[in-house]
Amino acid sequence: MRFVLIPGAASTSWHWHRVTAELRSRGYDVIPVDLPCDDPSAGLPQYVDTVVNAVPGDEEVVLVAHSLGGFTGTLACERLPVREFVLVAAMVPAPGERIADWWGNTGYDWVDGDVDAFFHDLPPEFAAEARRQLRTQSDRPMNDPCAFEDWPDVPTRAVIARDDLLFPAEFLRRVTQERLGFAPDEVPGAHFPMLGRPAAVVDYLLRGAAS
C-alpha cells in the first residue's frame, strides 16, 4: 500500500516526517509531497500537477491531505488511482469554490492572533523547529476555483483533531457534515496531529487500509 501525503498551507514534507517514518517502519511505501507554496507563479493547478507528478506508475494510493491540502487533494483524486482519500484537519471544498471564499462560506471565525494555533501542543523546542520549517505561502492559489462538479467517486474519510485551535472541532465537525454528508472521526492533538500525535494518525490511516 502506498500513501501520498499532501501538506497544508506554508507546510512541507517535514511536517509529515513523523507519520512518514512510522508508516515506513511498518513496511508501507510513502510519498510525502512538497508543494510550490512559496512560488508566486504557482496556482492550484500547479499544486495538483506536483502531487500527480510525484506518484510513479499506476499503483493505487491512499491520498492524505492536511488543512489547505484538502483543495489540492480533491482535484488530485480525479487524476490518480486513489484507493481512499483521507482528510486530516482539512478544508473541505465545495464545487468551484475558491480558497479565498471558503472562510466566509463556512462561517469561519478567525482565532486570536496572539495564540499559537498550529503547534501549541508540542514541546517548545519541537514547536520552534516546526515553525522554522514553515515556508512563505503565496496568495496565488487562493483565487483559483476548485474545479470539480461532484465530489470524487472514491472512498473518503475525514478526521479532525480534538484540540485544534485553528479549526476547532465543533466548527470542522459541522463543515464536514454539511459538505460530505457524514460526521468526521476524531483523534487527539492540535492542528498538526501528525506531529503531536503521529501514532494516532498512523493507526487511523491503517484502519482504513486494512478494511
Image (spheres, rainbow, N blue to C red):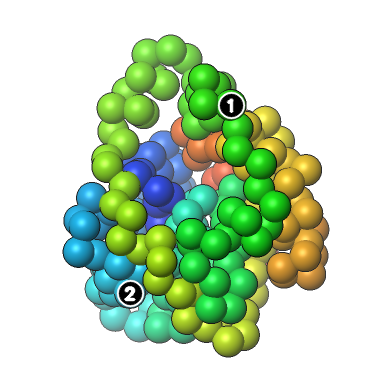
Q: Earlier in the sequence, mark 2 or mark 1?
A: 2
- Locate residue 78, reporting x and y percent: 46, 83
Residue 197 position by quadrant: top right
- Locate residue 113, reporting x and y percent: 52, 26
Question: Counting other residues with Cα less than 10 Å from the Cα at mark 2, is it few (<14), some (14-19), or many (20 or more)?
Answer: some
The front one of 80 and 148 is 148
The front one of 170 and 141 is 141
Residue that numbered label 2 is attached to: 45
Residue drawn at x 58%, y 78% is: 95
Q: CA distance from mark 2 to mark 1?
A: 32 Å
Residue that numbered label 1 is attached to: 112
The numbered disc on residue 6 is none
* Tally of numbered tags: 2
- In the drawing, does residue 68 fall left or right of residue 197? left
Determine whether 113 is above or below 49 in the image: above
- Locate residue 177, reporting x and y percent: 78, 62
Secondary structure beneath dot 2 equals: helix
Question: Counting other residues with Cα less than 10 Å from the Cα at mark 1, is it few (<14), some (14-19), or many (20 or more)?
Answer: few
- Which amino acid type is marked by label 2? Pro
Determine whether 9 is above or below 28 in the image: above
